[in-house]
Image (cartoon, rainbow, N blue to C red):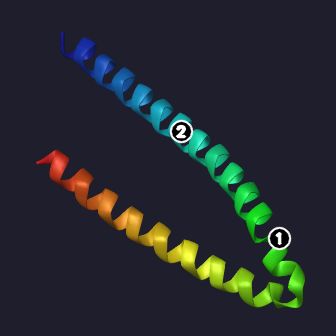
Amino acid sequence: MEEKKEGNESKSQIIMQIVALLTAAFGFVAALQWNNWVQAVMKPLTDKGKGQVWLLVIAVGVTVIAVLVAYFLGKMAGRAKQ
């Protein structure tokens, strides 16, 4: 009986990993699409000769937003576990 329980736990862990991988894959695809959109929107600004500076500003801004989102999602996940 205990072997069956261990088998079910292993199966559950594998399913959880597959779900996590699929979620990450879809997130990556969505990020690529956002990247295309941001590039299209910023193209007129970057073509005016100040492209390097604007790209740096955008990269820093997106990084700050990503860190804040990850932080708050981590806090929400921590609360959900309790």
Residue that badge 2 annotates: 21
Identify the element where label 1 is drawn.
helix
Residue 1 drawn at (x, y percent): 18, 9
Residue ID at (33%, 57%): 73
Q: Is residue 20 left or right of residue 50?
A: left
Q: Is residue 34 left or right of residue 73?
A: right
Marks 2, 1: nearer the viewer: 1
Residue 28, compared with residue 62, is above or below; it is above
Q: Residue 9: which quarter of the image?
A: top left
For the view shown, which residue lies furthest in the left direction? Answer: 82
Residue ID at (44%, 71%): 67
Residue that badge 1 annotates: 43
- Identity, as a three-letter code, of the amino acid under mark 2: Leu
Q: CA distance from mark 2 to mark 1?
A: 33 Å
Label 1 neighbour load within 10 Å: few <14, some 14-19, many 20+:
few
Relative depth, front residue between 48 and 76: 48
Q: Residue 10: which quarter of the image?
A: top left
Residue 43 drawn at (x, y percent): 82, 70
Residue ID at (64%, 85%): 57
Q: Is residue 80 left or right of residue 63?
A: left
Q: Which of pointers 2 and 1 lies earlier in the amino acid sequence?
A: 2
Relative depth, front residue between 21 and 65: 65
